[in-house]
Image (cartoon, coloured by chain):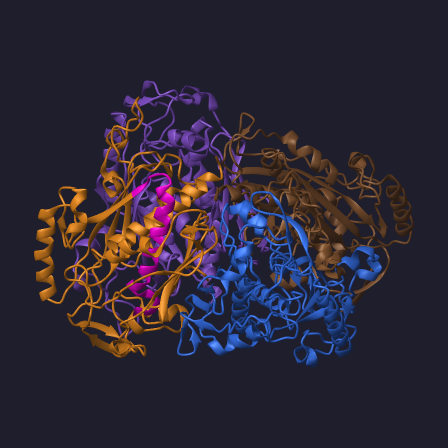
Chain colours: A orange, B purple, C brown, D blue
Amino acid sequence: MAGNTFGQVFRVTTWGESHGPALGAVIDGCPPRLPLSAADLEEELARRRPGVQAHTTPRREPDQAEILSGVFEGLTTGTPISLVIYNRDVRSKDYDALREVFRPGHGDFTYQAKYGIRDHRGGGRASARETAARVAAGAVAQKVLDLEKIRVLAYTLELGGIRAQNLDESIIWDNPFFCPDPAAAQAMNQRVKEVKARGDSLGGLVEVRVKGCPPGLGEPVFDKLDGALAQAVMSVGAVKGVEIGAGFAAARMLGSENNDPLLPGGGFASNNAGGILAGISNGDEIVVRAAVKPIPSIAIEQQTIDVSGQPRTLSIKGRHDISAIPRIVPVIAAMVRLTLADFLLRQRTIK
Amino acid sequence: MAGNTFGQVFRVTTWGESHGPALGAVIDGCPPRLPLSAADLEEELARRRPGVQAHTTPRREPDQAEILSGVFEGLTTGTPISLVIYNRDVRSKDYDALREVFRPGHGDFTYQAKYGIRDHRGGGRASARETAARVAAGAVAQKVLDLEKIRVLAYTLELGGIRAQNLDESIIWDNPFFCPDPAAAQAMNQRVKEVKARGDSLGGLVEVRVKGCPPGLGEPVFDKLDGALAQAVMSVGAVKGVEIGAGFAAARMLGSENNDPLLPGGGFASNNAGGILAGISNGDEIVVRAAVKPIPSIAIEQQTIDVSGQPRTLSIKGRHDISAIPRIVPVIAAMVRLTLADFLLRQRTIK
Amino acid sequence: MAGNTFGQVFRVTTWGESHGPALGAVIDGCPPRLPLSAADLEEELARRRPGVQAHTTPRREPDQAEILSGVFEGLTTGTPISLVIYNRDVRSKDYDALREVFRPGHGDFTYQAKYGIRDHRGGGRASARETAARVAAGAVAQKVLDLEKIRVLAYTLELGGIRAQNLDESIIWDNPFFCPDPAAAQAMNQRVKEVKARGDSLGGLVEVRVKGCPPGLGEPVFDKLDGALAQAVMSVGAVKGVEIGAGFAAARMLGSENNDPLLPGGGFASNNAGGILAGISNGDEIVVRAAVKPIPSIAIEQQTIDVSGQPRTLSIKGRHDISAIPRIVPVIAAMVRLTLADFLLRQRTIK
Amino acid sequence: MAGNTFGQVFRVTTWGESHGPALGAVIDGCPPRLPLSAADLEEELARRRPGVQAHTTPRREPDQAEILSGVFEGLTTGTPISLVIYNRDVRSKDYDALREVFRPGHGDFTYQAKYGIRDHRGGGRASARETAARVAAGAVAQKVLDLEKIRVLAYTLELGGIRAQNLDESIIWDNPFFCPDPAAAQAMNQRVKEVKARGDSLGGLVEVRVKGCPPGLGEPVFDKLDGALAQAVMSVGAVKGVEIGAGFAAARMLGSENNDPLLPGGGFASNNAGGILAGISNGDEIVVRAAVKPIPSIAIEQQTIDVSGQPRTLSIKGRHDISAIPRIVPVIAAMVRLTLADFLLRQRTIK
């Protein structure tokens, strides 16, 4: 059943396979009269683009999104905004060997089990390339957030066990790991080199901080803001865990430690809640962390089976990242933006 | 905007406040001809009921759900199933003191910020009592899962830092902590006593294992099964984090460690994926863990503010649990059941 | 699949069978801080109630709706509003004879074909009694419309071929046919007597006029306001046709006759559009007409079959109306109210 | 708020303006393994294409739909199917005169009122051109209907007051009016010539017959099949009325005339119900009629206002049809196909 649409008011539907002619997104429900041009989509797409950062896949994807509808003379019109990114530099032949084999850690087996058919080329719809459409749509969502001056900051908190100790926002985009701590970034670089040499791959943590979110966003009881953020972030391919504020650490805290006292001047004395109480934003910084598993495509030989159930060994060479980080950073940011834009517009209905 | 409905095909809408006349759920989309009676709802409701387990709130809630529609001569008819649980033993006066004050860690402030009005009595809609309707609905969802012999097992993995080391399914319901490890249960008992004496509260971890789930459930790309489970579980009041399979640990694993090799005879050599690959069930056991924060209502004096922004101190006495665990265990199980029943029926549309 | 919910922002889910314990509605998405009490639901429910008007079924249904949630100290809170109407005076034995037979013109056969099971008592979910929940919900919707001073006027335009020639709004509720023309009402009375004596039944037309609707409501392209109204009205049991403004007559007009010129002072020189242009309200009066088929339950003997396909003859005695009119008038009004309340709130998201 | 998606399981989202770079549709929820190619979309698109029939607009639109995703080696994969139709032969300059004026009978005024901005060129999103995407999507929906051998037949029943008296299915596509009665088609031709000479326009009736629909489709109570069809058909630009089976005529029938007796061998003795009882298909032919208003763009001079409220006169020359009929015929057929495909898949969830 249909599962490619996200949001209730600000609704995004994505489409497209890794090795088809194109991929894209249709945004329905974007308010009218917001300034929007293709250039607005470029910055975040560039951050997601392979080949830009160190150690990421050398496939060249210009990834330029075109706007096919919904914008008139530089302003949104309230009608659906159709974004398209054409696939270029597609080397489908590279994937012929994978037609008959199920790669461990990939969706090959489950897509086949679900649909009885799959486009094996580059992972088809399950490819990380699908997320380019999310990033483009997220840039449109940011235009809605701009109305309230809401800012979404995402970065690499940890990679291969190396954790950022400082958060210097200004340097995030200046290093190839989108890491806010220059010392950690340097250590990450070393770690990546080692693991790459062994043909293995790495996971890590991405953290998102939302600044300027007004209180009141979130729809109890099922569509709580944290629940929606959890789905949004978990819907990104490699993510295996999501936490809000203190998150899993809260499970070991006492109530007296975990509660955030309200302050007379407004705001809270601490932010273990991560900006969300009872599913509704409380006006404090929203903090979300995502656990990113290591990329399953590794050069090390693995045991698996083919489509007829026979044992096979597999060593994946070719153009692959060693980690979903840092390219996943703008994707997770996009999902947070899409969620917040939707909830901001949803909140308008009860005012 | 509306946020009290969960699911696409198997849809549950809950309603009701802690101190109103009743609360309930309407289930729309339940397949016809399933056996169902009020007695079927009783077992899980009993597990959620306060006063049954040690150390939980002494408020007496018979919590008997009545079925008002959708069942004819013991079978579901395909029409909406309306479940109602009347509120009894409601002592709203106990809450008069909280009318003007925002409790830290609760939704008092955010409900007020969102709606400009709130039913302060017992937390109103934000009360844990709301989850009784989820549990009743979850029992109906299990009837759908029974068609495929899918079993959902939930238990306390950790409480106050004490973690179960063994998983003996048979003893879960025999101890007041719903813990599968008797030694851990005993240690938890000790820990709870200490913290209770200090007027503080505890958090912990709940683990869910789904047995017998067929491969193919989950709707890429946004409605991935893990994304839906994350939302479902995070929508339960005290949950601050959700992980699938290896979860946050996967962030520190190598690809060669984390990948689960496919076996010639079917199945996988390991289950770091937690039964879900690319958002679709792979036929292996589905493993979900939830981080539960400590109950915010504590007897220890806290700093906060009242509705006019003036500083106040607050010490919450009265009938309160010291931890959402174990009563939250059947609630989380219910959310997993609701999710799976929905995805099982969604999958029928593409076969 | 679930089909008992109406609306996107102002969402109503109804439940209940004619001869079950109760029926009701849950409204999710109603804005907070609107005044609401059970008394507000009473006026429209009284108009739908059988036994009040001449010639309608003598079953006594007090039909008093209770509010179980979502209202605190006389104001809506933004949480779900649960309405319940208990079934009383239920004489299910009267229906034993219909257990095995499919009544012509009723849903007996199609419910059986769809679900493989049906509650035959009084039509079960297909009973006109289901509409009581819609009427109660419609009264809540009117509270939203009150914010913009929108008024929904519904009445009998035609019954048994007799058409109202004048529209005197003030007398609608003063005659048993809810007809705005006293002479027509008198002729309808005569017509009904004749047909009733023959054991037959009558159809007619209901007209709805919405006054004070602002321009801008309606969501192109599929959720046009006229499309939504058509679905809303056609979802009422006996309705077989819906038209907007000039409606079917427009099919025989010239463009020069049908176009409504825009006036310099605002508004239009005519209203063939029925207040809706390109699916969006234009600020003029919205005019909707519904074709209501004659009640299928007639005393005249009919040919039909039983559940095993054998021929049967059937003559339906008992407590039945001779026409869905006038009791259907408040039901259709309710559906229009629900539609407009939803679109009014939807429009808030783009402002 | 978002309104450009149709359907629950088989979901179609359309996008695009008349004079933008392209328009298209994304279909989510199409079952996998159905044969599909661009050629499958061509037949119905050709029928909708201007310039093919007599008297229709001479704008040349090749209207060739391309498939950008969701199909692999000639089969659907279960992932979203993206269809795009590029706009060519766009003469936007023709519309400069209309930038400041509201055309009577068009959505110019209401789009402006709703969004505060509009793409005036060719009607923008309100253009009949938008329906090309519906027709393409409808051809995909037919692939789902093919699984059950359901056939949708649509034709012109009446144009300019001239009504088809015979229904010869075989000649429908052989005359420029898509009329099943050759004598009526000839009279229509004459009528069109006269009215065209006067610079005026015509309306009419379109009838749809669905053959082979199994009983059981339709979701009580709000998502009745007839309600859904009413919305679907009314969502097409020029439609002002919809009726099912006997429709408005049923309002003047007696119950004994209108009821369709069930026959021992299966089926019904008559079909006043139009194949739908209590909102569920009964296995008989589904009959839907739509009232189509005359095209509002006429050469005759009309009174209107401009965007600043000043009076203006307007005479619309240029490339315009004299009636939405017959080009609207495949559009209405497409909406019926989309509705049925969705309900067919929805019914799978309860079996």
Q: Percent from the top left, x then y, of residue D351?
A: 55, 64
| Whether residue C20 can be seen here | yes
In which quarter of the view is residue A322 placed? bottom left
Q: Is residue D95 above or below residue B185?
A: below
Q: Is residue D69 above or below residue A137?
A: below
Q: Is residue D346 above or below residue B171?
A: below
Instruction: Identify the residue at horizontal 8%, vertical 47% (top origin).
Output: A183
Instruction: Identify the residue at horizontal 11%, vertical 59% (top origin).
Output: A192
The prevailing secondary structure element of the residues shown in magenta is helix
| Whether residue C101 can be seen here | no
Q: Is A2 positioned to the left or the right of A134 in the image?
A: right
Q: Quadrant of the N terminus of chain C?
A: bottom right
Q: Is B335 positioned to the left or the right of C12 in the image?
A: left
In front: D8, or B248?
Answer: D8
Q: Which residues are magenta?
A: A123-151
In front: B101, or C34?
Answer: C34
In front: D153, or D134?
Answer: D134
In which quarter of the view is residue B177 placed? top left
Q: Percent from the top left, x then y, of residue C230?
A: 65, 53
Q: Percent from the top left, x then y, of residue A25?
A: 39, 59
